[in-house]
Amino acid sequence: MSITTSDYLTERHLMLFGTIVQWFARYEVLMQQIIATVIGTHSADVMLLTKHLTLGEKRIALLDLLRHRVIPLDQFDAVYKYLTIPETFSLLVSDIKHSAWAAGRSSNSIQPDWILRPTPTIKPVHGGVDGRSDGVLEDYEDTVEYTLEQLTETAKTLGENYHRFFAYCRSSGLLVESDKEEVG
């Protein structure tokens, strides 16, 4: 009998998937609010114009706008740094939204079902100037596997970074009073 993807996902996995996706949505709204503040319009206008952009595309649009408006370099660097965290997890979110999930190689992990598991063969070594490295650096496709603990840590990292980013934007004037959301 074949085992289906749903046999590997628990309610906890699904709750963490939802939490991670929701943090991404909050980052998107915050970036739209910052854009609205910088150009002096309402958030709804920016949301309408950018609703079809991905988080990565909104991130690029915001950073380009901040460069164009010539904000202080330390402010630009701070925004860039805060947005590095969600960018780091963007492949995970894409997998959550667009993949079925299966059991991972280790007993307590899951992975997107798109990952091919061919019979082991000779694998090239990646990295290093001459193509060599101390250890084999695996590709994303080879390492995509998550435990509940890793997903929990990801959700926690996204949340903590979001709250720090929101507070920074409020204190640095990148958000106007009408664009503030409740931090909760």
Image: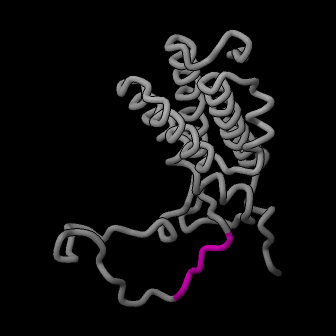
User: What secondary structure prevails in the magenta region?
Assistant: loop
Here the colouring is: one colour
Classify 150 as above or below 80. below
112 and 37: which one is in front? 37
178 on left or right of 133: right
Residue 121, position in %: x, y? Answer: 41, 90
Where is residue 10? Give x, y as percent.
76, 51
Residue 149 visible in this rendered orientation of the protein: no
Q: Nearer the viewer, residue 122 or 176?
A: 176
- x, y (%) of residue 50? 73, 43
| The furthest residue to the left | 130
Q: Quadrant of the N terminus?
A: bottom right
Q: Which residue is depicted at the point 70% across and 50% down?
A: 53
Q: Is residue 132 above or below residue 112?
A: below
**Highlighted range, magenta:** 113-118
Q: Position of residue 82 (x, y in %)?
A: 48, 32
* Magenta span contains residue 140: no
* 123 relative to 80 in the view: left or right: left
The answer to which image quadrant residue 39 occupies is: top right
Q: Is residue 36 above or below residue 118?
A: above
Q: How many marks?
A: 0
* Residue at x 60%, y 74% (from the top left corner): 115
Asked if residue 14 can be seen in this view, the reply is: yes
Q: Residue at x 75, y 65 (%)?
A: 100
Tell which of 59 and 19 is nearer to you.
59
* Quarter of the image with the C terminus in it: top right
What residue is at 67 percent from the left and 37 percent from the top? 28
Nearest the viewer among 57 and 27 is: 57
**Is 31 on the left-hand or right-hand side of 41?**
left
